[in-house]
Image (tube, grey):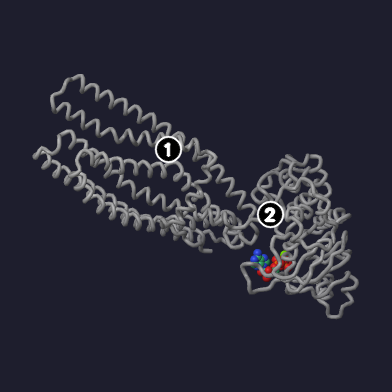
Amino acid sequence: MDSEVPKTKITLPGLRKLFKLYSYIKPYKYEYGLGLLFLLGSSSASLIFPKLIGELVDLGNQGKLAQEINRIALVLIAVLIGQSVFSYFRIFLFVRVAEKTLADLRQHTFNHLIRLPMKFFQFRRVGELNSRISSDITLLQDALTSTLAEFLRQIIIIVGGVTLMMITSLKLTLFMLMILPVIMILVVLFGRYIRKLSKQAQKQVADSNVIVEETLQGIQSVKAFTNEFFEMLRYKQKTVEIAQTGIKNGKLRGAFSSFTILGLFGAMVAVIWKGAHLLATGELATGELFSFVIYSMFIGGTIGGIADVFARVQKFIGATEDLLEIFNEPVEEVAEITSLPPNQVLHGNIRFDSLSFHYPTRTETEVLKQISVTIKPDTLVALVGPSGAGKSTFVSLLLRLYEPTQGHILFDERDNQGIPISALRSQMAIVPQDIFLFGGTIRENIAYGKTGSTDELIIEAARKANAWEFISQFPEGLDTLVGERGTQLSGGQRQRIAIARAVLKDPKILILDEATSSLDSESERLVQDALEKLMKGRTSIVIAHRLSTIRQADNILVLERGRIIEQGTHEELLLVENGLYRNLSGLQFAV
Ligand SMILES: Nc1ncnc2c1ncn2[C@@H]1O[C@H](COP(=O)(O)OP(=O)(O)OP(=O)(O)O)[C@@H](O)[C@H]1O
Ligand SMILES: [Mg+2]
């Protein structure tokens, strides 16, 4: 999905957002304020510098006493030392504040992201989100440490410098001011164009990162389909684009830099030319001209750098907008569950009340239509039906991963909207269709069902899930690494780890979305057997692809194209003339 390139114009709302981000600095405002003071100190010191040098030259020129000359020189050295000390503390303090602020910002971003509803992730690609956020945060780091400080320093130098120059010679200053603004405007215009290109380059880099990330994540599929060359080509195209944009950018940067040099030295020549005339008429002293030239150099250099800072501020606003856009997405009201208040405890009765649903990304296709069904406490309910009928969607709604577009889901006759989302989810466990294991150890993966569980509990859960047998055969036992996404385990093993995880959670409602890949009959029996043990005392919902799994279900819901078309027990459904279930089981059991 192509994300909009954020606008980076410096506008009032943009600046307001920027300041909103600066609110993250609040806890460290004293440190930051101190840093600003040091910045003020070091900038002022650098302003005094040319003035003192001018005086030094004039003293020499006037043939003053050596003592006096030495005094000024000593003051100069003191100013230099002051400036270096100030600089040290300024950088140190700013970096400290920036690092702490960034840590807060990173946490805030992650905490926010993780609580966003599934709907949000439907519209974003994880790779893009990831690289955008990390590049945005890097930009902010730059902004917090150097950009603002740089900007302030530049303002101080320009304003202070011009003031001091005016005191020295109003005429010459006005002359210089006639040239400078022209250069300045050109610099800004130029800078604006370069900025646009660098934003484009940034976006292209992000796109190329998405390719790398997705390819590596799906490396097995890439290889299996011998699509290495396809991916290489895809990546190559992107990198070539990046290079082209970069080169175009480079040309402009070069032109920009020569333009700046020309403008600045041209201005310098003009100032000295004008100054020489003033010297000749005695309106200016030599030392004054000297300090004037140094001030002009300072100011010229500052103006050269200001476009860069300007660009950085704009990028900063762009990054801020990106982040704030994410921050403005409403989060789910998740809460840490320590103990459930009695009125939030589920008893296992579930009712779907004329529920309809479509996914947020595909508003035109209704996936579930007018579902009304009751699931009684402590029963085993099976969902069957052709692929794409909406079975997995049914359970996603149960977990409130998505909200129905119409109708309601009631738990113990209470609307699920009235039950806190975390309380609800904490009493359900799902063994999903595509099992996701984290890249750590088996222990960590099982413990994910209930973090902080003891080994004893973990082993017990593994036993119940018929997983202990194979885990104990690994030389490293619970410490066995499962590989990225669990790829170093077999499908059946992964499934049993996922079941153990669910067991550990000890939910009131257990959901099993059976993987379509059929297990061998021995593994299937183990999984089956594990499930039977697990279903006691809870409501279980099993999505089964193998009908043998569900013969003993209390109720079987047959789903087709989003509707429940039949329901009943195995025996009952077999009696339905031309029934879908009867057809399906005829097919399966005939083999
Ligand atoms: N995240 C999603 N976004 C948009 N559409 C989706 C999403 N997930 C599923 N769908 C669509 O919703 C429909 C129902 O999908 P669902 O996963 O519920 O089917 P299923 O009954 O579980 O199928 P299977 O037996 O193959 O697992 C399908 O047409 C599918 O394309
Ligand atoms: Mg499914």
Question: Could you tell me which residue is drawn at 35 percent across and 28 percent down?
Answer: 82
x, y (%) of residue 5? 46, 60
Q: Residues within 10 Å of mark 1 (few under 14, many from 20)?
A: many
Q: Name the residue under label 1.
A: 36
The residue identified by callout 2 is 333
Image-based side of 372 in relation to 64, left or right: right
Comparing 482 with 364, the one in front is: 364
Q: Earlier in the sequence, mark 2 or mark 1?
A: 1
Residue shown at the point (68%, 73%) measured from the top left: 366
Q: Where in the image, quadrant-wise, is ligand 2 located?
A: bottom right
Measured Cα–Cα span from mark 2 to mark 1: 39 Å
Disc 2 versus disc 1: nearer the observer: 1
Q: Position of residue 390 (x, y in %)?
A: 73, 69
Taking the image as drawn, is residue 98 in sight?
Answer: yes
Near-viewer residue (580 or 23): 23
- Is residue 205 shown left or right of residue 342? left
Q: Which amino acid does label 1 sit on?
A: Leu
x 60%, y 49%: residue: 110
> Going by the image, does 550 lie left or right of 261?
right
Residue 301 placed where, x, y %? 28, 43
Q: In which quarter of the image is the C terminus?
A: bottom right
